[in-house]
């Protein structure tokens, strides 16, 4: 089956990429659709064909962010819960989030824009579904907390890596050499699996 993107989906992807660049440079609130169109080298009308508002762009970002979560949930729902399934869910989530690191940074840096928005609510519901699959049936509060912490280890590692890069060695006495993206991902997966591994099947 061909994985070639259609021209329309490729254009939408380009718009999201450019919008993320401008949101990172100027902030979500201060970026206009006109600036996004100018950076893309298209007319505002051409941009409107794909996204009529910035909220529509945020929805597109959320949909792109949620794709690996949706795929992991669809896979997990077909499996009987086991520690092996739990660990595979964590691995699939980590791989998907790393591929979408720029989207994840947008989530970290634009919480006010997402809080209370339909797109933010949709993403929250997806995360709740993912957490439930990781902790499995008959979960205690501790189990649910460990599942949540396991998944957010990936987000935390990318957040920490960005802070290190932003600091650019400003605190050399307080930390070792800044990790690479690959090292940060490997560390996050190790920590996530360690935390998730404390969830026992059928915990009361």
Image (spheres, rainbow, N blue to C red):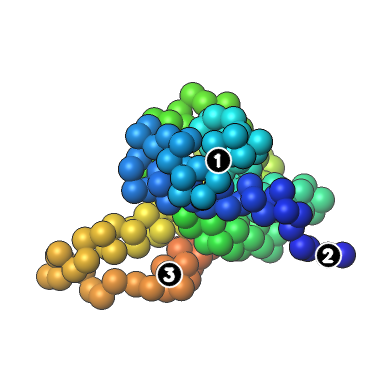
**Mark 2 — residue?**
2
Q: Quadrant of the N terminus?
A: bottom right
For label 1, the residue is: 43
Query: Residue 156: x percent and y percent?
Result: 40, 54
- Mark 1 to mark 3 CA distance (whole Å): 36 Å
Looking at the image, is mark 1 or mark 2 nearer the viewer? 1
At horizontal 19% and vertical 68% (from top left) the residue drawn is: 169
Kindly indicate the quadrant of the structure image that contains residue 168.
bottom left
Q: Earlier in the sequence, mark 3 or mark 2?
A: 2
For this rendering, which residue is in front, 129 or 107? 107
Task: Specify the quadrant of the image occupied by residue 89.
Answer: bottom right
**Number of numbered markers:** 3
In the rendered image, residue 121, in percent from the top left (x then y), is placed at 56, 29
The disc label shown at residue 181, or none = 3
Q: Cα distance, mark 3 to mark 2?
A: 30 Å
Residue at point 72% right, 48% down?
8
Relative placement, left or right, of 170 versus 91 is left
Residue 94 in view, yes or no: no
Viewer-side residue, 170 vs 85: 170
Mark 3 nearby-residue class (10 Å; few <14, some 14–19, many ≥20): some
């Amino acid at each position: 089956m061909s994985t070639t993107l259609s021209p329309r989906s490729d254009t939408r992807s380009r718009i999201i990429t450019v919008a993320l660049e401008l949101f990172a440079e100027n902030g979500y609130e201060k970026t206009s659709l006109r600036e996004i169109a100018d950076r893309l080298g298209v007319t505002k009308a051409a941009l409107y064909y794909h996204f009529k508002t910035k909220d529509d762009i945020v929805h597109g970002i959320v949909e792109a962010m949620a794709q690996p979560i949706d795929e992991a949930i669809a896979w997990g729902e077909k499996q009987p819960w086991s520690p092996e399934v739990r660990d595979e869910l964590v691995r699939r989530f980590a791989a998907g989030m790393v591929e979408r690191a720029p989207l994840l940074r947008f989530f970290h840096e634009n919480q006010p824009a997402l809080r209370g928005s339909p797109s933010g609510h949709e993403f929250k519901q997806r995360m709740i579904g993912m957490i439930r699959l990781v902790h499995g049936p008959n979960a205690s509060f501790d189990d649910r907390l460990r599942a949540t912490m396991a998944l957010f280890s990936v987000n935390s590692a990318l957040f920490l890596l960005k802070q290190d890069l932003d600091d650019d060695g400003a605190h050399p006495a307080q930390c070792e050499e800044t990790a690479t993206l690959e090292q940060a991902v490997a560390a996050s997966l190790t920590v996530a699996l360690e935390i998730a591994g404390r969830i026992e099947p059928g915990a009361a």
